[in-house]
């Protein structure tokens, strides 16, 4: 098979490259002797493909689905479970404890209902996701949307709680050999529901959480010689920040403390409170280890499988294989100043003047190396909430100076601070981030979409900036606005697969639809789609796009929006490493040939995956 030659490619043998040792869980790999106790028929379920065989895999119109005659028998699932040491879990939705049946538990139901918006209960659950709308909302606490029943819906049928590479290899082999769908869940933060899928076997990577500090890592091809961290793909932002802080270091990660920053986050680019000074999370990657569709376990870097390494730095998750670990650059920690506040106004006119004053500072604040994360909540009394303004290597006085022009305008228009500005300087970046940002809540029960706004569209007083402001500000009364003001320069002069529009952007904005109401789905969707198209239309031919990790599952022209000019090359890599489409996710590279058959108004993952 062509894939075997691909994974053995090494480039220059003369360059200097540090090869990080395998993490302990990566040293446990599937070997032929592990299958010696199985009968030939049983072993065929979890075995690697025979590279000498001329027999082509069976071509199916659809992935095998529960109820099909080819669906694996209970004995087949037992073979997989024995091979992975009992790590196979039959999916029980998180809220199943609220409904009659074997899982009913009133105490547990009360706890889940009370804490449903708390991301931690979803992150730590084998199958739950933070965007249940795109799972089908088939098992919610009864107090939500008048829910009356619980079914598995768009959740996977089984989950592998992986703690070794061997288990991942067995799971991938089982899915490929039986023709069932495979999905990957880390923490379940993906906004478009990529972490789930009906009738699937899910590879749960959340517990691959080892971390190793490398004092000196050298890679001549990437031009790097310095400290690094290697972590399992299940490592959370807070854990990596704390590990780095213990060494007097910081790494580029997200503001969400319980996001798996070495999983889908970094694979999709990953914006960070440090992006304005160090670039995107994908810019920090020095190497990645991955289990491919044929079950093989390899490491990619600038000199080992470089084309796949290029694709993994921005090409998205659930596409090329199951990433098990990532090695990233580390930087000396910096004193960091943060600010939090919120305001409103007695009139919408004054409120919008306050927001416009901030809008006019986007370019200057991004160029000053800052990052901000804010909400605008519509209503009779609109509210602006600055969840976190971050200024690495800047003092309280410097931040006050940066924000003073905005605050002066707020005061002149009689806005009211609901939470007065709290500006605090921390001795380390990690402490600043962990003290400032909360965990991410469950995603709103409505549609979301996002856009990157380039600096050309926000240059104050330009005609395009005026038109962009008009189009953007019209959305404020229609739904929640979530904004991120920062830049993402390519400071290391890297060639990666990340969306090129990131390099021109100074504003990443998400907008939400009206709350999802049964019976009004079509109306809500049409109104929301119109707003998104208005944003796109006003930007026209400007260099723009959308962040694939925080985007609509029905992004029009998603190939261009998520990857721009890199898409064709990415498809080539996908065909090379996964010619049989073992891995598939909605709006992922090469996904055009398949579709989930569902009658829902929006993609909810609750259906059979078939060829188009």
Image (cartoon, grey):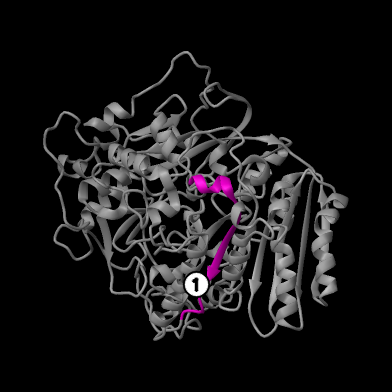
Residue 512 counted in the magenta span: yes
- Examine the image and state in which quarter residue 305 appears: top left
Side (left or right) of 457 relative to 417: left
- The span picked out in magenta is 499-516
Residue 556 versus residue 231: which sits nearer the camera? 556
User: Which residue reaches farthest front?
Assistant: 463
Compared to 30, does 272 lie above or below? below
| Residue assigned mark 1 | 531
Residue 598 counted in the magenta span: no
**Placement of the C terminus among the 4 image quadrants:** bottom left
Side (left or right) of 343 relative to 19: right
Disc 1, SS: helix
Q: Position of residue 529 (x, y in %)?
A: 44, 72
- Examine the image and state in which quarter residue 355 appears: bottom right
Compared to 268, does 105 lie above or below? below
Q: Position of residue 596 (x, y in %)?
A: 28, 63
């Amino acid at each position: 098979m062509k894939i075997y030659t691909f994974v053995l490619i090494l480039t220059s043998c003369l360059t200097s490259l540090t090869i990080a040792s395998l993490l302990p869980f990566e040293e446990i790999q599937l070997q032929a002797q592990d299958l010696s106790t199985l009968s030939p028929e049983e072993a065929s379920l979890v075995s690697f493909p025979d590279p000498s065989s001329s027999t082509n895999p069976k071509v199916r119109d659809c992935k095998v689905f529960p109820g099909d005659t080819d669906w694996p028998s209970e004995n087949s699932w037992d073979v997989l479970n024995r091979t992975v040491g009992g790590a196979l879990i039959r999916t029980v939705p998180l809220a199943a404890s609220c409904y009659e049946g074997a899982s009913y538990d009133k105490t547990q139901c009360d706890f889940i209902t009370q804490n449903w918006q708390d991301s931690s209960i979803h992150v730590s659950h084998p199958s739950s996701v933070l965007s249940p709308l795109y799972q089908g909302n088939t098992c919610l606490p009864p107090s939500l949307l008048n829910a009356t029943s619980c079914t598995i819906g768009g959740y996977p049928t089984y989950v592998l709680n992986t703690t070794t590479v061997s288990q991942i290899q067995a799971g991938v082999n089982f899915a490929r050999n039986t023709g069932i769908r495979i999905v990957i869940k880390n923490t379940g933060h993906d906004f478009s529901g990529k972490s789930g899928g009906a009738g699937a076997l899910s590879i749960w990577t959340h517990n691959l959480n080892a971390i190793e500090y490398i004092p000196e890592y050298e890679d001549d091809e990437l031009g790097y010689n310095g400290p690094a961290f290697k972590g399992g793909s299940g490592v959370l932002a807070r854990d990596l920040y704390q590990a780095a802080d213990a060494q007097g270091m910081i790494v580029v990660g997200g503001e969400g403390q319980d996001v798996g920053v070495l999983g889908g986050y970094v694979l999709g680019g990953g914006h960070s409170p440090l992006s304005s000074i160090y670039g995107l999370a994908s810019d920090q990657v020095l190497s990645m280890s991955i289990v491919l569709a044929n079950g093989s376990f390899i490491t990619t870097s600038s000199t080992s499988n470089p084309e796949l390494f290029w694709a993994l730095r921005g090409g998205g998750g659930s596409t090329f294989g199951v990433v098990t670990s990532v090695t990233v650059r580390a930087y000396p920690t910096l004193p960091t100043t943060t600010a939090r506040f919120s305001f409103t106004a007695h009139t919408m006119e004054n409120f919008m003047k306050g927001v416009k004053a901030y809008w006019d500072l986007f370019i200057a604040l991004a160029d000053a190396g800052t990052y901000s994360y804010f909400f605008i909540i519509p209503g009779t009394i609109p509210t602006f909430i600055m969840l976190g303004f971050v200024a690495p290597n800047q003092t309280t006085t410097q931040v006050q100076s940066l924000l003073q022009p905005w605050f002066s305008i707020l005061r002149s228009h009689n806005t009211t601070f609901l939470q007065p500005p709290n500006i605090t300087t921390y001795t380390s970046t990690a402490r600043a981030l962990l003290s400032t940002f909360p965990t991410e809540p469950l995603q709103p029960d409505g549609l979301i979409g996002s856009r990157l706004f380039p600096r050309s569209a926000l240059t104050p007083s330009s005609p395009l900036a005026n038109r962009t402001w008009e189009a953007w500000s019209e959305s404020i009364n229609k739904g929640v606005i979530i904004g991120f003001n920062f830049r993402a320069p390519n400071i290391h002069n890297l060639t990666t697969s990340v969306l090129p529009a990131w390099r021109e952007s100074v504003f990443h904005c998400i907008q939400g639809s009206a709350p999802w109401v049964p019976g009004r789905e079509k109306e809500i969707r049409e109104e929301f789609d119109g707003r998104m198209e208005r944003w796109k239309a006003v930007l026209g031919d400007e260099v723009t796009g959308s962040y694939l990790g925080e985007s609509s599952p029905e992004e029009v022209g998603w190939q261009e929006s998520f990857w721009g000019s890199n898409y064709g090359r990415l498809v080539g890599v996908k065909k090379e490493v996964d010619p049989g489409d073992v891995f598939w996710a909605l709006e992922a590279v090469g996904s055009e040939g398949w579709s989930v058959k569902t009658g829902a108004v929006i993609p909810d993952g609750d259906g059979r995956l078939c060829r188009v």
